[in-house]
Image (cartoon, rainbow, N blue to C red):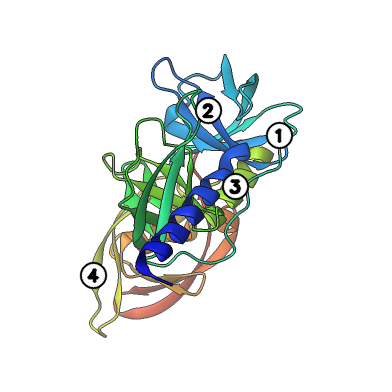
């Protein structure tokens, strides 16, 4: 097949990908200025970006058929910049989540529906995949970075692979306007928790710390402050202790620690491996939940 023919086939595949996502792509009216985008990810449920939902009431979405329907905010997570809206009797099939893990260098389509005129798209690649990542809003397990252009109103829309399956949910609200996507597997999981409980459990110990190397050459966190009546104080952690691991997972910096303070660990009692005065000890700590 000649080069012009290959380009024609690729071009057709990209257009087909946008067509496949079109029914599940909606316009989200959640702020007084530029509308944003959203994806139907489950029956009657829409994933969008948290930062584009500036009001809790008077929310609406517009479907690919041009219907404007009232929406209810059922949960939001500022840290991942995701929110879930419920729309009654939304008889549209949910978008397909990509079954293949994204790879750096693969083609990616950023797609949004910022107006009633229909979908918009821009082509790029997956530039980087990283995590845990500290952003302006907190610690995220994983993000996808793309060089596809996020036009105004694309936040909340999908980052697609070449088949039209969703690799991630787009946002420009996490790192100074950079085009990022929350991986679909993570976004779907967060969406499910938001739909059930309205928020995401995130834990805390109640300590201030800094990275340090022990005399044995191990990396850990030197405890420099313990808050009163905190989980750390109740567990017996003292200033000067060096935290080496939690729940069996090694900790070498504060990002490692923050990554462990999520999900099912919140509220659980877990073992902490520390050194105190050069001697190894194990403490039991019940992880607190941030209000």
Work out whether 148 lies above or below 151.
below
Q: Position of residue 80 (x, y in %)?
A: 45, 44
Which residue occupies the foreground of this view, 128 or 269?
A: 128
Q: Residues within 10 Å of mark 3 (few under 14, many from 20)?
A: some
Give the mark toward the camera: 4 or 2. 2
Report if residue 195 is visible in the image. yes
The residue that mark 4 highlights is 212
Give the mark toward the camera: 2 or 3. 3
Mark earlier in primary sequence (3, 1): 3
**Disc 3 and disc 4: Cα gap in Å?**
51 Å
**Disc 4 and disc 1: Cα gap in Å?**
49 Å
Where residue 27 is drawn, which disc sits there?
2
Q: Secondary structure at mark 1?
A: loop
Q: Position of residue 58 (x, y in %)?
A: 57, 14
Mark earlier in primary sequence (4, 1): 1
Which residue occupies the foreground of this view, 115 or 45?
A: 115
Q: Secondary structure at mark 2?
A: strand
């Amino acid at each position: 097949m000649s080069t012009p023919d290959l380009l024609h086939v690729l071009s057709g595949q990209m257009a087909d990908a946008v067509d496949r996502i079109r029914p599940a792509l909606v316009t989200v009216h959640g702020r007084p200025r530029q509308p944003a985008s959203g994806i139907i990810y489950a029956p009657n449920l829409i994933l969008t970006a948290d930062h584009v939902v500036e009001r809790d009431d008077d929310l609406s979405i517009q479907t690919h058929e041009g219907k404007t329907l009232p929406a209810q905010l059922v949960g939001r997570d500022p840290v991942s910049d995701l929110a879930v809206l419920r729309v009654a009797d939304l008889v549209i099939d949910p978008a397909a989540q990509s079954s293949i893990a994204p790879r750096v260098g693969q083609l990616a389509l950023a797609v949004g529906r910022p107006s009633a005129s229909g979908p918009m798209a821009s082509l790029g690649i997956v530039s980087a995949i990283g995590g845990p990542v500290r952003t302006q809003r907190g610690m995220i397990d994983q993000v996808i970075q793309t060089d596809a252009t996020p036009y105004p109103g694309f936040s909340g829309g999908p980052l697609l692979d070449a088949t039209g399956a969703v690799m991630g949910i787009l946002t420009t609200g996490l790192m100074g306007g950079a085009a990022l996507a929350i991986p679909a597997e993570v976004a779907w999981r967060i969406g499910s928790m938001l739909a059930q409980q309205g928020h995401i459990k995130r834990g805390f110990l109640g300590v201030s710390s800094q990275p340090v190397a022990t005399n044995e050459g191990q990396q850990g966190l030197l405890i420099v402050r313990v808050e009163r009546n905190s989980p750390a104080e109740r567990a017996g952690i003292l200033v000067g202790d060096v935290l080496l691991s939690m729940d069996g997972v090694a900790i070498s910096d504060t990002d490692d620690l923050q990554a462990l303070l999520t999900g099912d660990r919140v509220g659980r009692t877990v073992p902490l491996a520390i050194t105190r005065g050069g001697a190894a000890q194990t403490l039991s700590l019940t992880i607190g939940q941030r209000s």
